[in-house]
Image (spheres, helix red, strand yellow):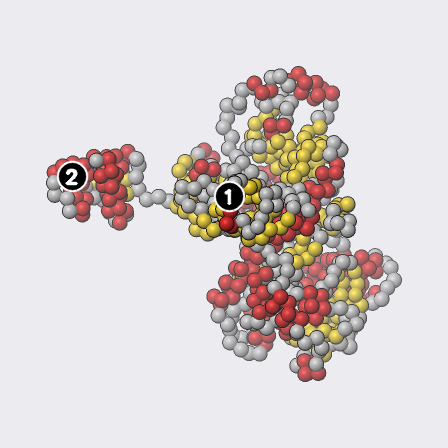
Amino acid sequence: MEKHKNSLLIKILQILGSYPNKSFNYKQIAAKLEFNSEELRKQIQKDLQTLERQKKIKQTSRGKFKIVQKTLYIGVIDILNSGNGFAIVDELENDIYIPNHRLNKALHGDMVEVEIIKRKRNKKFEGEVIRILERAKTHFTGIVKMFRNYAFIDPDDIKMYKEIFVSKDNLNGAKDGEKVVVEIFDWPEKVGSPIGKVIKVLGQPGDHEVEIHAILGEYDLPYEFDPEVQAFADNLPKKITSKDIKKRRDMRHITTFTIDPVDAKDFDDALSIRKLDNGRYEIGIHIADVSHYVKPGTILDKEAFSRATSVYLVDRVVPMLPEVLSNELCSLRPYEDKLTFSAVFEMDETGKVYKEWYGRTVTHSDRRFTYEEAQEIIEGANGEFKDDILLLDKIAKRLREQRFKNGAISFERTEVRFKVDDKGNPVEVYFKEGKDSNKLIEEFMLLANRKVAEFVTKRLPPKNKTFVYRVHDDPAPEKLQNLNAIVQKFGYKLNLKSRKSIIKSINKLLQDIQDKPEKNMIETLTIRSMSKAIYTTENRGHYGLAFDYYTHFTSPIRRYPDVMVHRLLQNYLNRKQSPDKDEYEKKCVHSTNMEIQATSAERDSIKYMQTKYIEHYKDVPFEGVITGVTEWGIYVELTANKVEGLVRRTEMRDDYYYYDEDEYAMIGEITGKKYQLGDMVTVKVKSTNPEKKQIDFEMIYDSVEDLKNINMKNNTVSKLPKPKRNFRNKKK
């Protein structure tokens, strides 16, 4: 009878669900079910009351019922260290908290459908994953834990809250304790762990090469080319023929040079300069013509598209193209003729553009400068092409000044770099500083990218043509409000009244925090409050740069979208029809996704190196700034080397601490002592785990009184009452 009752409940829900905007009484439902007996009709009446109590249906008028429609939201899952998560939903002001038991097999980064099951105070929600729409990833790295006839893989990714089951037949020769790449291929409904197979055995954990390859494997990024791709690249013609030159503008006679990092191997851009008879200057921005060698549909093109970007790890580059292209054929090396794609401008010293020309060229670099060499000339040293470099620097500064006047935002993050020994171990941390020579190149690349996008969109036929843009949308208002709430605690303020006032106050904020302990933290929070830049065929402008038109034209050796832009530009210069927009949009989405993967791998490699570096400094006191506060502890960034680690709440033994979300603070229940964002603290390294890229700090207390306080409470802290308020987890 119970089974029958359950099936009847389901049938009633199915009927009401088929007519979500209509109401039915029990007689109408009985008619739909073709039930004639009085007993069954009475059962329908009882079931309707049951469903109403369960809030699955509601009574719209006496005796008439309608289904309660669930509101489902689509979002992306962000897993916390605790194993719980949040669903990030664009249309909601606050993220939806998802406890672990309601994740329903959703993993970090997955796109899911979520139902809100609880509405809390302050517009905050708790929900449940109803359906997984798209897996963010299926490849994970981890360490094999062997049992008799099977194994579990303990994932490196701390956001992966389940071990992965692998049967003996799917181990691919992996042994206990080895690091592997595993692919999840199934996760049955009533099985506690996902099921996978080992697709690559990397080696012993802790070995430098193994760990770097594990980072690439984690994001499914290749680190070597298939033999067929390499052979195709090796067989490309090495010489430039007279036939090639005849099709191009010959600019080999004009002074041309490159300015790049000291350790660069691929030089994909060069500048040329000459004075014109009218007193103005012809300045050429010359980019390696990768599209000459990488033809659509070839195995080389398919591989370049698949990778979509070069990956810059701390100790190596994983190139988009084989080295015969990236370091030889397409690299604008000094004293060699090269095939290039150029943007040539007639300009004056103020940076005003009078004429512009775009097309294929052949160029010859007269000199390779490092940034340091060019900087010495800018600062007064003598050197080759001094007058040219000083003029370009002058124009670049005017372009930069005009850009900020138009509303660009001044993001200049500190970049962490490492010096490594011959075994790949970090021996020194230093910071990359952007000086005038860096900014010189940056401004001319920005000019080319902006002008190419504007030229194609506005001046070349046909109208409404397919093109690839690099867009950066305006930030969401609620994110700016959250940022403002945080920075106000440090004495700063954003003016959110208008677009112009927002940009002006953000730039003032970024200027005011220079040389302040909270600089790096506020810069990070400000960047996180911005929208993410993406590739798309829909032009929406670039908020951060304050450009109405913007693309990526200047780095085709390392970015596939630039190759697409070169092809499209030449297509329109040849007066050909616009290609299919949908196809290019799919390529844009793929390129954006691969850029995100590469950026994540780069960050992981930095974190890995930081962990390896700092493990040699245990018990050394470091000054740091609190960069994050969560229910499980406080994150501290060391001011000396930008290494970030966690002081766990359970290790803060001088009091019982609770997390106050409104204050962004950890507060002692008895002493009232408060640790909040931006506070300076002294810590030492407690433990490190390079394989999982985890660093734990412990607090060094400031005074004898603090130490006495700890000793006095050592026997009582564990017995302290829990705080009365119930504070939920907060994402870092």
Q: Is residue 314 visible?
A: yes
Residue that label 1 marks: 150
State the image quarter where residue 639 is shown.
Answer: top right
Of residues 631 and 389, the one nearer the viewer is: 631
Amino acid under disc 2: Leu
N-term mark: 1 or 2: 2
Q: CA distance from mark 1 to mark 2?
A: 52 Å
Of residues 47 and 545, the one nearer the viewer is: 47
State the image quarter where residue 143 is shown.
Answer: top right
Q: Position of residue 28 (x, y in %)?
A: 17, 45
Which residue is at 83% across, 58% downward?
Answer: 376
Amino acid under disc 1: Tyr
- Viewer-nearest of discs 1 and 2: 1
Q: Is residue 219 visible?
A: no
Q: Position of residue 169 (x, y in %)?
A: 50, 49
Q: Is residue 319 above or below residue 520?
A: below
Q: In screen coordinates, is 161 left or right of 687?
A: left
Which residue is at 19% across, 44% downward?
Answer: 29
Of residues 122 and 724, the one nearer the viewer is: 724
Classify mark 1: helix, strand or loop: strand
Residue that label 2 marks: 40
Q: Position of residue 691 (x, y in %)?
A: 64, 43
Which residue is at 69% across, 48% downward?
Answer: 208
Please identify the residue farthest to the front as the structure is shown: 148
Q: Position of residue 186 (x, y in %)?
A: 45, 49
Q: In screen coordinates, is 487 left or right of 588?
A: right
